Amino acid sequence: MSKPKVFEKPIGVKDYLPGAVAKLRHIERQVLACMQGWGYEQIMTPTMEFYDTVGVASATSDQKLFKLLNNRGTTLVLRSDMTAPIARVVSSLLKQSDFPQRLSYHSNVFRAIEEEAGREAEFFQTGVELVGDSSAEADAEVVALAIASLKAAGVERFKIAIGHVGFLNGLLEETLPGRTDAQEQLKSCLLGRDYVGFRQQLRELALEEPVQRELEGILRLRGGQEICDQALQLSADATAQASIRHLCEIWDVLKAYGVSEYVLIDLTMIGDFSYYTGMTFEGYAADLGFPVVSGGRYDNLLAQFGRPAPATGFALKTTRVLELLGDAEETAAERTLVLYDASGRSAALAKAQQLRAEGVSVVTERVADWSAAVAAAGERSPFTHKGVSYTTLLTYTEGGGVR
């Protein structure tokens, strides 16, 4: 028999101690309040879903889903994102509600991972879904809200890169007509940010020099509004042209929001091209190599649940934001310590209840050695008692007096 695992945890999961939980909850409250201010209502869905309903509709690859069997032998999954569960709710419980629908959430999600550094099997997301609006205004709204949410979370230095799946689809179909495998290989390189591999794939395709030069030019399509103008000159394909015009409209709306300084147009960024159907975006903090927010348009998902509708949204990687802010100075919470002896117990506990009703955090403790207890606290404020910091000390002694 194997030795019982006493302290070990499965790879990819972690414990959050009180300080981290306080910061995580603070981020959650601030971001959800921001989203509520934009008209988004919070929703909660089950941790477990049917594989045949939500699992197969998820953007997460099948091998990364946590699957389990219930006592009837039905395959369930732990939710790997919130978009598919919300699509299920919009198509069922909210079927009679008019579009557009604005929904927000904060949830833990689960992804099966390989044993590699920096990957988590369970993490937290806070996000929104805007369902039933296909306009550039809707896409710009979720980008602007993502920016506002990052600020609300306490992230100060970041950039949002936006792209459009349709531009690359149109350009590749124009330059590599019918060569589906080659198109997919090039997309995969861009999805993985493998620009060396992208150039290598182009060389192996043995394209004519003008075509190769045109496709290599994609890698330089990163910048401000001028990128839209350059991209319009790069491809005459109708899909590519329509995609860039949509992106130009998004940029104009973001300028009206006053947030274009945070945005970078990056036409090499396509997100999961099998899932997203239009605009995609990612947000990177200055001090973190991983994206802290990502999202985009996914107009095909709702049809899988029987209620076709356009949709766009994003997920804030709350756990990564916590890592980013982990060393930030934390303001000590207001906390009162009430010490009492046997005769002062009633008055002390009554006072503690009164303070708690007023929203004060109170710890009570019966004391045998007054001199040691009070000397430990001294006259300092704040002070530490048994390893815990307090801002106020109340003592109830013989006769009910307060010290």
Image (cartoon, grey):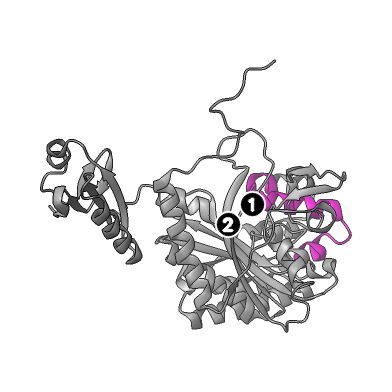
User: Regarding mark 1 in the picture, which secondary structure is present there?
Assistant: strand
Q: Residue at x 41, y 46 (%)?
A: 18
Task: Pinpoint residue 366: horizontal percent, then vertical percent.
Answer: 26, 43
**Residue 262 at least partly seen:** yes
Q: Which residue is mark 2?
A: 125
Quadrant of residue 40 within the rendered picture: bottom right
Which residue is at the far top?
1
Instruction: Give how far apart the Cα atoms at labels 1 and 2 are.
Output: 7 Å
Q: Residue at x 61, y 73 (%)?
A: 228
Q: Which residue is mark 1?
A: 109
The residue nearer to you, when weighing 67 against 396, is 396
Number of marks: 2
**Residue 237 at least partly seen:** no
The residue nearer to you, when weighing 321 against 50, is 50
Relative horizontal placement of residue 388, taking residue 47 as reference (left or right): left
Q: From the viewer's perspective, is residue 102 above or below residue 3?
A: below
Tell whether position 251 is magenta: no
Q: Amino acid at mark 1?
A: Val
What range of the chain is rendered magenta? 170-199
Quadrant of residue 179 within the rendered picture: bottom right
Question: In the drawing, what numbered circle is on residue 249?
Answer: none
